[in-house]
Every structure is written in structure tokens, then in C-alpha cells.
Image (spheres, rainbow, N blue to C red):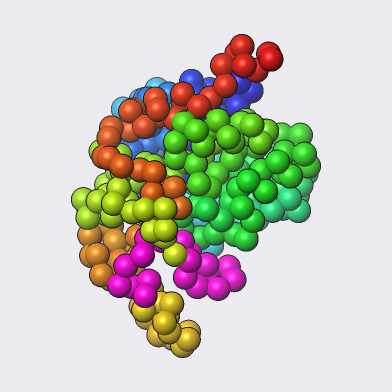
Amino acid sequence: MHLTRLLHIQNPIIQGSMARISTPALVIAVSEAGGLGVLTTTGATAESLQQDLKTIRAATKKSFGVNLMLQQPNIAELLPVLQADPVPVVFTSAGNPAPFMKELLGLGTKVIPVIPNVKIAKKMMALGASAIVAEGLESGGHIGTETTMALVPQVVAAVTIPVIAAGGIGTAAGVKAAFALGASGVQVGTAFLAAEQTPVHNNYKQMVIQADDNGTVVTGTGGDRVRGLKNALTEKLLATTDPATFEQLSRGSLQRAIEGDVDRGSFMAGQIAGAIHEIRPAKAIVTELAKGVPTIIEDLF
């Protein structure tokens, strides 16, 4: 598969970076399993990022990635770390990587932006992106407006670089569907919320595996639209029309979810949560997802 050669991985399975959640233990487990683990930098400092990279490299020789959410206020502090100590892959989201993309590429780092529509996909390709992640609104966390089913084939038709499908993919069947749409690989987040190595409270994992097909809801508007599991907090967020109240309720809610506060936490997860039924090792999740990757024979015919 072209994406596996590009990223030096065994399976075209990318562990989506989950803010404050995709820490070294999960990254290492996914990369060791043959996928691509991706480190979150949300809440990181230059020093903590340096330590996380050291931890990952001490535990695995496999390829891994780092995600930069470009709305973070300290991106200017994190970039020098990735420039001084280049990593295999950098994923970018929520912003324009143009100011630093050329330099990272020159260092040998593959740069892969997450995009919500065809227009931005074309812009990222023109900037020299190594590949792109086309993410549909079925995903957890901050979402766009297009579905994975509609977005992926249109992006594939519009660009000549590998397209990684994301949003609503968490089973082997979903992986197979993504390849049928023309994707070269998949990015999966929600399924890894239920990985043994994921550093969230068991309450979070239980909410994921107990969710049904109607278990998530979107709160917020515009660029602040967030998909998460239904709970007392989402009910309050949907009920309020006051921006100040919305902000007060939302502030710190992801961290509260990570710590297991079932009433006041924002349990970000995608619509595929309804198909996740057990807590398993990351290796088992990667192995199951890889069953949906087309074989060489299927590619030929």
C-alpha cells in the first residue's frame, strides 16, 4: 500500500490524536502493533514534548506521529522542538501549516493536515502536504459539516496525494468502506478510547462501550461544534442560549471527562461508539481494523 511505504508502517491504520489523551503509552502500543501512533501536544510545553519524544523513542523503533492543533497559544514554543529533533510525521489541525510546512518537509518529516472540505484539501496539496486526512462530521471532538461518505471520494478525486479517511471508522467493515471510497488509509480515534493503554478514567471507557448508535450529540455552533457522548453536561449545553454560560460550562470539561466526571465532563467520541463493545489492548484493535484493508489480490482485481 502506498501509504504504508510513505509512513514506514505495516498497516495503514492511523491512531487519531485525541487532545490530552493520546499520550506516549497509547502511541507506543499502536506503533508497536503495526499502525501509526500519534502523540497529542494539547496542553504540552516544550519540555514535556521533549520528554514525551524521548519516552516514545526509548520504547519503540517504529514510526510515529505528532499532532499540532494550531489554535494552541504556544505553537511557537513547540515547533522548535520538532525542528531540532525531527519526528517521522506531523499532523496538523485547526489552522494553516503554511508558515512551517516547507521547513518540516525539508527535515524529512512528513506533514499531513486534517481537512474538512475539498477546497482546503487542494490548498494543502499545493503547499506540499505529504498526504491529507479527510475527516467527516461523524468523528468525535471538533467537527466540520461534511459526512465521511460524501467527503472522502470528492477529496480523492480532487488531489493526487494519499487521502486518509476519518470519521465514523472503528471496525473492519468501516476500513473496507473507506478503501472502497478511494482512501489509502484510515484514521481512527473513538475505537482507541477503549484501548487498555488509553490514559482515561474507566468511566470514560465504559461510556464509550455502553453507547448506542444514537449515543452522541453535537453541541456548539460554527467552528466550535463538538461531538461527544450524551450526558448531563450536553443537556445543559444544548439548553442554554447564553454564550457566557456555555463557555463557563465547557471550560475544563475535557479534563473532567478524562478524570471520570460523568456529569460535568465532555466525553468526546464519534458516532461509531455504538459499535465499540469492549476494552481491549491497542494491538487487538489494530489487528481487527487491519482485517478491512484490501489484500494485494483485491487491489489487483
Write the residue at 23% across / 65% down: 261
Residue sitting at x 39%, y 25%: 287
Q: Is residue 28 visible?
A: no
Horizontal placement of 72 versus 96: left or right? left
Image: magenta residue range: 218-235
Left or right: 271, with 133 as reference point: left
Q: Is residue 48 above or below residue 293?
A: below
Front residue of 254 and 136 = 136
* Picture quadrant where residue 264 is located: bottom left
Outermost residue on the front side: it is 213
Vertical comparison of 182 with 50: above or below: above
The reply to whether residue 145 is in sight is yes
> Which quarter of the figure has residue 96?
bottom right
Residue 282 vertical position relative to residue 218 in the rendered view, above or below? above
State which quarter of the image contains the C terminus: top right
Say which of 18 and 270 sits in front: 270
Between 166 and 97, the residue placed more toward the observer is 166
Image coordinates of residue 209 in percent, x first then y, are 30, 48
Q: Position of residue 227 (x, y in %)?
A: 46, 61
Residue 219 among those drawn in magenta: yes
Q: Residue at x 33, y 54 (%)?
A: 211
